[in-house]
Amino acid sequence: MKYRLLTGILIIVNLHVTQAQISYPVPQKNGKMLFYLQRSFNKNTIIFETELLADNKLNSERPINMHWIRYEEDGRTSELSFFQRKIFGMRCTSIDNSKSSFLLINSRMSMLKIIVRKSALGNYKAYLEINKQMTELERIFIKATNNSLGIPISFEYIEVSGILTESGRLNTERIIL
C-alpha cells in the first residue's frame, strides 16, 4: 500500500513538472491586439484589444476590450465572466485631455502601470516599464494558486515581456509577489 501511494505521488509530481515545461500558444496578432495574458492554470489566453470608433480613435467610454481564446477547448473566443473581469480586468483612466491615451491598472497587479497610446506608426500600443526601460508590452504571465473552481486565490509571480522601444530587443522581468 505504501509503495502504491509513493508511486502515485511521484506520478503526480512528474506530471506537474512536465506540464510546466509545455510551451503555451502565442495568439495571432492583429491590428487591435495590445497584449495577452496567460496563467499557469491552463493555456486559455486573455486578449486585450483596443476598442476603436469609426474614425479610428479610441472609444473613450470603453477603450479596452477583453476576451478569451479558449485553447483548452476548441480555440473559440468567448467573453470573460463577471468574476474573471474583476480578477483580470483593467481599470482605464484617461491621461490626456483628448482622451487618446489611457493608463491601465489591475487591482491585483497594481505595480504594473500600462500606458496605451498611439505609436509612431499611428496604431495603438501598450507600454510598460520593464527592468526600468520603456517597453512595448506583448505578454503577461501569471503563476497563480487556484481553488477547485479554477479561481485564482493568490498570485505567486507575474512575468511581463515585450520589445524595448529603444533597441527592439526582447525585455522580460519576473515580479515575485
Image (spheres, rainbow, N blue to C red):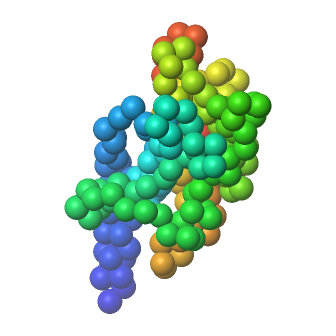
Residue in the image at 67% along x and 28% along y:
129
Q: Nearer the viewer, residue 61 or 65?
A: 61
Measured as percent of width and height from the top left, residue 72 is found at: 29, 61
Left or right, residue 174 beside residue 1:
right
| Identity of the residue drawn at 22% across and 61% down | 74
Q: Position of residue 39 (x, y in %)?
A: 47, 55
Position above or below: 73 against 118: below
Q: Is residue 78 left or right of residue 87?
A: left
**Is residue 37 visible to us here?**
no
x then y, percent, for residue 45 = 40, 53
Q: Quadrant of residue 12?
A: bottom left
Residue 9 placement, left or right of 134: left
Q: What residue occupies the far top of the structure in this picture?
A: 167
Q: How many marks?
A: 0
Q: Vertical placement of 140 versus 2: above or below?
A: above
Residue shown at 57%/71% (left/top)? 83
The image shows residue 100, relative to residue 167, as above or below, that is below
Residue, far front? 55
Is residue 46 among what the camera can see? yes
Q: Residue 28: which quarter of the image?
A: top left
At x 32%, y 89%, the residue is: 1
Q: Nearer the viewer, residue 119 or 38?
A: 119
The one nearer the camera, 85 or 15, is: 85
Q: Position of residue 124 (x, y in %)?
A: 52, 29
Q: Going by the picture, which residue comes out furthest to the bottom?
A: 1
